[in-house]
Amino acid sequence: MTQHLAAPSTGTSTDAPGHRTGWWQDAVIYQVYPRSFADGNGDGMGDLAGVRGRLPYLRDLGVDAVWLSPFYASPQADAGYDVADYRAIDPMFGTLLDADALIRDAHDLGLRIIVDLVPNHSSDQHEWFKRALAEGPGSALRDRYHFRPGKGADGELPPNDWESIFGGPAWTRSTDPDGTPGDWYLHLFAPEQPDFNWEHPAVADEFRSILRFWLDMGVDGFRVDVAHGLVKAEGLPDLGTHDQLKLLGNDVMPFFDQDGVHEIYRSWRTILEEYPGDRILVAEAWTPTVERTANYVRPDEMHQAFNFQYLATSWDAEALRGVIDTSLDAMRPVGAPTTWVLSNHDVTRHATRFANPPGLGTQIRTAGDRELGLRRARAATLLMLALPGSAYVYQGEELGLPDVTDLPDEARQDPSFFRAEGQDGFRDGCRVPIPWTREGSSYGFGEGGSWLPQPAGWAELSVEAQTGAADSTLELYRAAIATRRVHPGLGAGTAVEWLGAPEGLLVLARPGFVCTVNTTDAAVRIPVPGTVLLSSAPVSTDGAEIELPADTTVWWTV
């Protein structure tokens, strides 16, 4: 495979008159899953020192910002999304001094740092929750969570019928200090993750303080975990149905996407605007429609929201065009950038999703056709980076890494894997540490091996193997991000123009730029729209026509 890069032009996008300015409008943001990125101390687990040491790689990749998944003090019941102390670093990742050094080094390299914030729930080892249990009924700290008496003659039944995202009831019964069964507490995720009660002023005060703590440390923004979940419907009403997981993303639930969350984010926005440097809020908000997602990014709330509808779309021209149009249409009235993402730490990597038949969802257990998956993944990446708005890249996708679908059961560490119900529990496949070098016990991840086993064939997928290789996926990403940064028709914006195209193809235009995408399994001849900038697979023109190969995207300057 080859890609072709013409001499870059300079400028900024002009296809969105009146759009808000700000670095996040067209940023390429790179997600680091710290335990799997780089190991700085040789214990087999990635850490902040490892990330710090690899920051020059991210600068050279061309990204604008780095989003770090949670590194807070945590018992790791859910890989750090169960936070015991929001102002401390878990020892497995380092110290606050390591975090400070990482932020400073990133800024020196021209990179911004976005950190995960987990406000929906804490760890059951959080000091508030431990004291709430130890002090028993009547403790004022219980009001900062959702403690309720159970139903039934002896309170033996949960307070309502809500189900945990991880399976089973969303309630666990506590034990009073005298050893007798007590009230139940709400946890929309694992029992080790009790939900905060955001109606209590102390909770809101605490998170305003946490925001200021990290802003004072110099972070450039927050990715807000479960941003849709903080406020629960008054009275915690029954949902009246089972298999509630199947309803997520399709209906407004009494525990998700309640209108009260928006007051919280408006108050957070005022805090960020006290600080210089365009600090941002990014919503992880699973909502029934992109129109409801847009509510989170109104001008006085957050700056971006993840576009999960796009991530879940199959490699199909009609479906892609539909979700692109819907996404742009939803964000335009609120003046927020549309975001685009293909992979993250919770879903099967898109090189593997696209290697399988469509319709299997975002968590897939089969490897599929590896060559087909990589070809489609490269094409999908060029489409994503051609769209107006901001793009997210998950660590290792720039290497074309597939999901590791054959991890032995004894190696798995996804907490969901050990639960009888709920999520599949196969997220380990996208969390395997990435390869940096051709050799070594962990392909350069660290000197002490890897906390999850890496496939034997990853040597040739490593950064070392792909750097400088003209046909490598890494060099495709580098070229695409560099071109996106300087071409006047790419980056921020609110619209694309669709040009006529045969079935199965997409042809979209932006100022001085055209992107052609073939999602079919056969080559198609189309008119040459301009001069080739970049292609996901080798292409050749024949006079006024080009034969666009199957599963291929080409960028053109016109």
Image (cartoon, grey):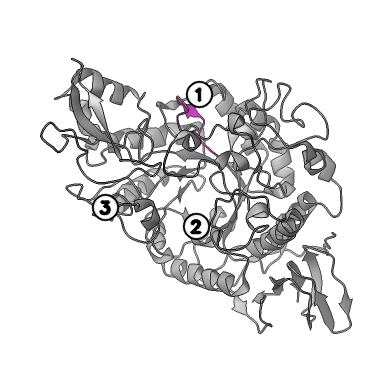
402 over 56 or under it: above or below: below
> Mark 2: which amino acid?
Phe
The Cα atoms of the two marked residues, 3 and 2, are separated by 21 Å
Seen from this angle, which residue lies furthest top? 178
Q: Position of residue 416 (x, y in %)?
A: 47, 37
**Dominant secondary structure (helix, strand or loop) of the stretch shown in magenta:** loop
Secondary element under disc 1, as helix, strand or loop, is: loop
- Quadrant housing residue 391: bottom right
In the picture provided, is 58 more to the left or to the right than 546? left
Which residue is found at the position 71% from the left and 74% from the top? Answer: 514
Secondary element under disc 2, as helix, strand or loop, is: helix
Q: What residue does disc 3 label?
A: 254
Secondary element under disc 3, as helix, strand or loop, is: loop
Q: What residue does disc 2 label?
A: 308
Q: Is residue 113 visible?
A: no
Which residue is found at the position 47% from the left and 62% from the top? Answer: 336
Q: Position of residue 329 (x, y in %)?
A: 47, 72
> Mark 3: which amino acid?
Pro
Q: Is residue 472 visible?
A: yes
Q: What residue does disc 1 label?
A: 90
353 over 426 or under it: above or below: below
Instruction: Indicate the quadrant containing the N terminus: top left, top right, bottom left or bottom right.
Output: bottom right
**Does 74 lie within the magenta span?**
yes
81 over 131 or under it: above or below: below
Residue stretch in magenta: 68-77
In the picture provided, is 14 more to the left or to the right than 263? right
Give 126 or 116, whichever is nearer the viewer: 126
Label 1 vs 2, first from the N-terminus? 1
The Cα atoms of the two marked residues, 1 and 2, are separated by 29 Å
Which residue is found at the position 48% from the left and 46% from the top? Answer: 279
